[in-house]
Every structure is written in structure tokens, then in C-alpha cells.
Image: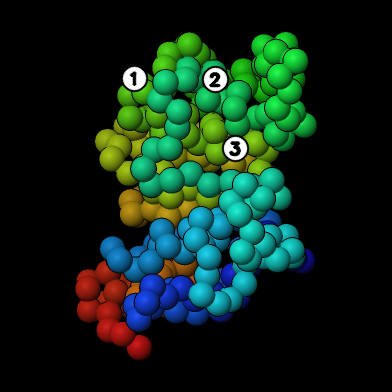
Amino acid sequence: MTAALSLHDLRKSFGAMSIIRGVSLDIENGERHAIIGPNGAGKSTLFHLTSGRIRPTSGEVSLHGERITGLPPFEINRRGLSRSFQITNIFPKLSVYENLRCATLWSLGHKYAFWRSINGLRDVRERSQWLMEQIGLTGRRDVPAGVLTYAEQRALEIGVTIGGGADVIMLDEPTAGMNNSETEQAVALIRKVTEGKTLVMVEHDMSVVFNLADRISVLVYGKIIATDTPDRIRENAEVREAYLGQASHQ
């Protein structure tokens, strides 16, 4: 079977500084895959390379067997990969409903047309309403996104991320800054909205990682040192060493 997402010898340098140093990884269709590692390991850079935000120095990224290396982010999104960001990335002055509506338009086949009112698009209304129900924000429909609580904003961003119908979802630290109760709700939400999809996430909270992930990859100094099931990663001596800050450059 063709992997949902495949990275082959991916590398990124900024001047003389090598950040990603030959990452190869296949993520299967329907898999929930976590990427973990110490601060500065290159996790967000790897996300940026995969989603087209920055270009790799060398190597390839493939989505469902098709090369997407070097494509702009909007093209990658239209081919079925969507991502969230470490810092909440929503339209603060638009309402919850309007944010979600923006996310659905292209996937439902609607392009800009000055003669047609967006309010008359029934499929967009229905899809946006469904998304609000999925993320638990129906009661906040007309509230500007900028005044939502932090946890609500993160839920909205997840809704925007899945709104375009992508089947590969990348979440960058989706529970960062949340308390225990908010984290539990976020995990339940992620599990629900990514059902049947491929999930790739960067996450520091190990309880979230071990609760959600089918497999885990550990990134240290720009290299993957292990990819395995949660139980095996938990017992991996090299992984424990890396998290104790004793890993050395290879």
C-alpha cells in the first residue's frame, strides 16, 4: 500500500546550520502518528517542510504517492493535506461561523464570484454548521473568534484545519497551554474529528501522545532515532537518554 505521507531523506539547512538531517518516514493511511523530541530538535521545521511553508534543501515529500516537494502550501492543501500551527492561526474579527465558512469554500467547489452572495450557498452553510457541532462551538456561532477562550480558539483552529476535507491532518502542539480538563476535551475532539483520517501531530504532553498515537517517531538533532509503537518507545533506552538531555550528536 502507498503511504499517506512519505518523507525521503529530507534535509534543511540555514546557512551552515543543519536543522533537519536526513529524515525518512512513511505514515500509513488512517494512522495516528506523533512526532516527539526535545526542544530544538527540529519538529516544527519538519512540519513546515512537509506542509510547504518552507522548502527543503534536499529530499522529497510525497502525499498518497505523488510528489509535493516545493509546491506552495495552498496547492498541498488542495491535494489533501491540512495543518494547524503552534500559535493559534484564525481570523480574530470574524465569527466562529465565518471562520469555518472560509475553510469550506474551495473544497465545495466555490471560487470568488462578485455576483453571488456567500450567504446563499446552502452546502457551505450545512458544512459549517456540521463543523461547529463537531468542535462543540454551536452556542458560540456568532462570537468573534478573537474573544473566545484559548481552548475554544484551539478547537476552532482544528475545525478550520479539517474544514477543507483534507484526509491528512497535521496538528502542531494542539494541547499546548491547556489545563488538564481542557487537554482531555481536546484529545476527545481530536480523536473524533480525525476518525478515518491520517493524523500527524507534534506534541510535548506525553499523556496525549501515548493516549492518541498508533506509532511515535522521536526526533533528536534533526534525525529520527526511533519509530515504534508507544509501548516500545516508552521502553527504548536511546529515547529515554535523549529526554534526559544526554543525547550526543552522531
Lateral position of residue 106 relative to residue 36, left or right: right
Quadrant location of the C terminus in the rendered image: bottom left
N-terminal of the pair, mark 3 or mark 2, is: 2
Q: Are marks 3 and 2 in contact (CB under 8 Å)?
A: no
Residue 1 lies, with reference to residue 177, above or below; the image says below
Farthest residue toward the left? Answer: 245
Disc marking residue 147? 1
User: Is residue 23 in sight in this rendering?
Assistant: no
Q: Secondary structure at mark 2?
A: helix
Residue 64 lies, with reference to residue 193, above or below; the image says below
Where residue 218 appears, as percent x and y from the top left, is 41, 69
The amino acid pointed to by label 2 is Glu
Residue 190 lies, with reference to residue 146, above or below; the image says below
Tell which tag, 3 or 1, sits nearer the viewer. 1
The picture quadrant where one finds residue 24 is bottom right
The alpha-carbon separation of the residues under discs 3 and 1 comes to 22 Å
The amino acid pointed to by label 1 is Val
Viewer-closest of 16 and 137:
16
Where residue 179 appears, as percent x and y from the top left, is 27, 36
Farthest residue toward the front? Answer: 114
* Residue hosting label 3: 162
Q: Secondary structure at mark 3?
A: helix
Q: Residue at x 64, y 59 (%)?
A: 71
Disc marking residue 98? 2
The picture quadrant where one finds residue 222 is bottom left
The alpha-carbon separation of the residues under discs 3 and 2 comes to 15 Å
Where residue 235 appears, as percent x and y from the top left, is 37, 71
Label 2 crowding class (10 Å Cα cut-off): few <14, some 14-19, many 20+? Answer: some
